[in-house]
Amino acid sequence: MNYIAFFSFVFFTSITPGPNNIAAMMYSSKYGFRKGVLFVFGCLIGFLCLMLCCAVFSSILYETIPAIKPFFLTGGALYMLYLYVVNSILKQAGLKE
């Protein structure tokens, strides 16, 4: 496993806007900066653990059943294509700016 790519992915996806960051902002405004920092640190550790479990499971699955890798790659590509199509439909309908 490429650890540099893995940890850079975890870092950049953990700092992008999402429900964890919105919850951290609300938590910080309610309980203060120190508890907000602890909340953000907890979110980061939780996200890191989740991504680590996914990476380990995928690696074990690839080693155990090597024939499954093309299905994962195809499924991932189809999912990205689906997201593109849905996004473009929403843009055309004027529902997304």
Image: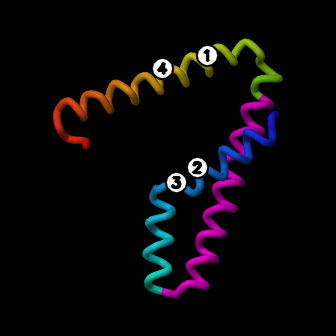
Between residue 14 and residue 53, name the one nearer to us. 14
Residue occupying the far front of the picture: 97
Mark 1, residue position: 71
In the image, which is nearer the foreground, mark 2 or mark 1? 2
- Return the disc, 1 or 3, that comes first in the chain's sequence: 3
From what the image shows, is residue 38 above or below residue 23?
A: below
In-image side of 65 versus 16 (left or right)? right
Q: Mark 4–mark 3 contact, CB under 8 Å?
A: no
Which image quarter is the N terminus in?
A: top right
Label 2 crowd bin: few (<14), some (14–19), many (20+), radius 10 Å: few
Checking the image for residue 78, the label placed there is 4
Give the percent coordinates (x, y) of residue 84. Answer: 38, 27
From what the image shows, is residue 40 above or below residue 75?
A: below
Give the percent coordinates (x, y) of residue 19. Answer: 45, 59
Residue 58 within the magenta-colored segment of the rendering = yes
Mark 3, residue position: 16
Task: Look at 46% across and 56% down and name the residue there.
Answer: 18
Q: Mark 3–mark 2 contact, CB under 8 Å?
A: yes
Q: Is mark 4 on a helix, strand or loop?
A: helix
Checking the image for residue 13, the label placed there is 2
Q: What element carries label 2?
A: helix
Q: Is mark 1 on a helix, strand or loop?
A: helix
Give the percent coordinates (x, y) of residue 89. Answer: 25, 28
